[in-house]
C-alpha cells in the first residue's frame, strides 16, 4: 500500500454511461476494488432504460455519488461529474473501460508523490468487446505537445487532470461530439504544462464507443478543433489533415474495412 496515505492526492474517477448494461458492472468493479483508498467515485447516467440503473444501485453504497437523468451529450455528462468532484485529480473511465488491475491507481499515486503536476498520463490498453488486446498505447519518457498536432496522444482513460487545469481552462465544450477531451487539452497548447509520464498500463479502452466506425467524422472534428485554437498555420493544418485522412483511407482499403 501507499505510505502516508493522507498526504497522497484524492483522485476522482468519473464514469459516464447510457444504456451500458453489458459492461457497466465490470467497470464499476474495476474502480471500487482499487487498493488505493484516496478515491472518489462518481457515476453520471444519461437516463438509462436497459437495467444499468439497477446495476448502479447494487453498488451505490460503494459509490460516492451518482445521478441518472437526461443530458446534452458526453461533454455535458463529463461536466456534471466535474462539478460534483472534490478530488485533486480527475480521471474518466467510460462504460466498458476501467482499470486493468486493483493496484492501477496505487501505481499512479506513487508516481505523483509530492510533485502535483497538472497532467499525469499512464499507458492504456485498447481492447475489443471480448476484452482481447488490440494494442498498448506508446508512452515516451517525455511528452511532446507536437504529438497533439496529429492526434489525441493522451487518452483520457490513462489521463489524470489536476483540478487547477479545469479552473484555468474551463469545462468541456458541448459543441464537440467525439473529441471534447482533445479540444480541452488544446486550449493549453501554446503554454502546454509538463506532463508526468507513467510507464505502467493502468486502464482499458474498449473499441466500441460512440466513435467506433466514425473515423472520418472524428478526423473532421480534429481538424476543426485545431483550426479553432490556431495551433499551427493553415497550410500545416491542411497538410496534417490530408495526411491523416489519406492514411486512414489507404488502411481501410488494404484491410477491406468500411468507414
Image: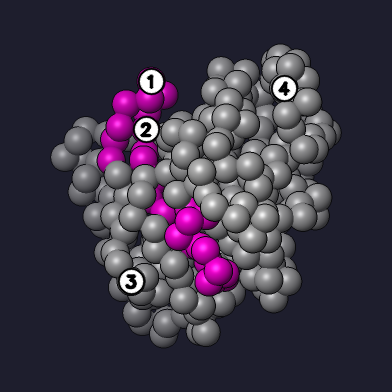
Q: Which element is circle 3 on?
A: loop
Disc number placed over residue 130 in the picture, else none: 1
Q: Which residue is mark 4?
A: 59
Answer few, some or many: residues within 10 Å of disc 1's Cα (few below 14, many 20 plus, some between 14 and 19).
few
Q: Which residue is mark 3?
A: 142
Between marks 4 and 2, how big is the CA–CA gap?
25 Å
Marks 4 & 3, CB-CB < 8 Å contact: no
In terms of depth relative to the viewer, which is nearer, 156 or 2?
2
**Looking at the image, which residue is at 56% across and 77% down?**
188
**Residue segment shown in magenta:** 108-135
Marks 1 & 2, CB-CB < 8 Å contact: yes
In terms of depth relative to the viewer, which is nearer, 113 or 16?
113
Between marks 1 and 4, how big is the CA–CA gap?
24 Å
Answer few, some or many: residues within 10 Å of disc 2's Cα (few below 14, many 20 plus, some between 14 and 19).
some
Residue 118: in magenta span: yes
Q: Which element is circle 2 on?
A: strand
Q: Is residue 38 above or below residue 119?
A: above
Q: Is residue 198 above or below residue 169?
A: above
Amino acid at each position: 500500500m501507499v505510505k502516508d496515505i493522507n498526504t497522497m492526492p484524492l483522485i476522482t474517477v468519473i464514469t459516464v454511461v447510457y444504456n451500458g448494461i453489458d459492461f457497466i458492472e465490470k467497470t464499476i468493479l474495476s474502480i471500487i476494488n482499487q487498493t488505493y483508498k484516496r478515491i472518489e467515485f462518481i457515476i453520471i447516467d444519461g437516463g438509462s432504460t436497459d437495467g444499468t440503473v439497477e446495476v448502479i444501485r447494487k453498488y451505490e453504497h460503494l459509490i460516492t455519488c451518482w445521478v441518472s437523468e437526461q443530458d446534452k451529450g458526453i461533454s455535458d455528462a463529463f461536466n456534471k461529474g466535474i462539478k460534483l468532484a472534490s478530488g485533486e485529480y480527475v480521471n474518466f473511465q467510460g462504460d466498458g473501460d476501467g482499470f486493468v488491475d486493483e493496484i492501477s491507481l496505487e501505481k499512479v499515486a506513487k508516481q505523483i508523490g509530492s510533485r502535483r503536476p497538472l497532467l499525469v498520463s499512464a499507458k492504456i490498453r485498447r481492447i475489443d468487446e471480448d476484452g482481447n488486446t488490440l494494442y498498448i498505447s506508446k508512452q515516451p519518457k517525455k511528452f511532446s505537445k507536437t504529438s497533439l498536432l496529429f492526434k489525441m496522444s493522451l487518452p483520457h482513460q490513462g489521463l489524470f487532470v489536476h483540478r487547477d487545469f479545469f479552473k484555468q481552462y474551463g469545462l468541456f465544450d458541448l459543441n464537440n461530439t467525439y473529441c471534447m477531451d482533445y479540444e480541452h487539452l488544446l486550449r493549453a497548447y501554446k503554454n502546454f504544462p509538463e506532463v508526468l509520464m507513467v510507464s505502467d498500463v493502468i486502464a482499458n479502452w474498449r473499441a466500441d464507443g460512440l466513435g467506433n466506425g466514425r473515423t472520418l467524422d472524428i478526423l473532421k472534428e480534429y481538424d476543426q478543433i485545431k483550426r479553432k485554437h490556431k495551433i499551427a498555420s493553415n497550410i500545416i493544418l491542411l497538410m496534417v489533415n490530408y495526411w491523416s485522412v489519406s492514411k486512414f483511407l489507404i488502411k481501410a482499403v488494404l484491410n477491406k474495412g468500411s468507414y
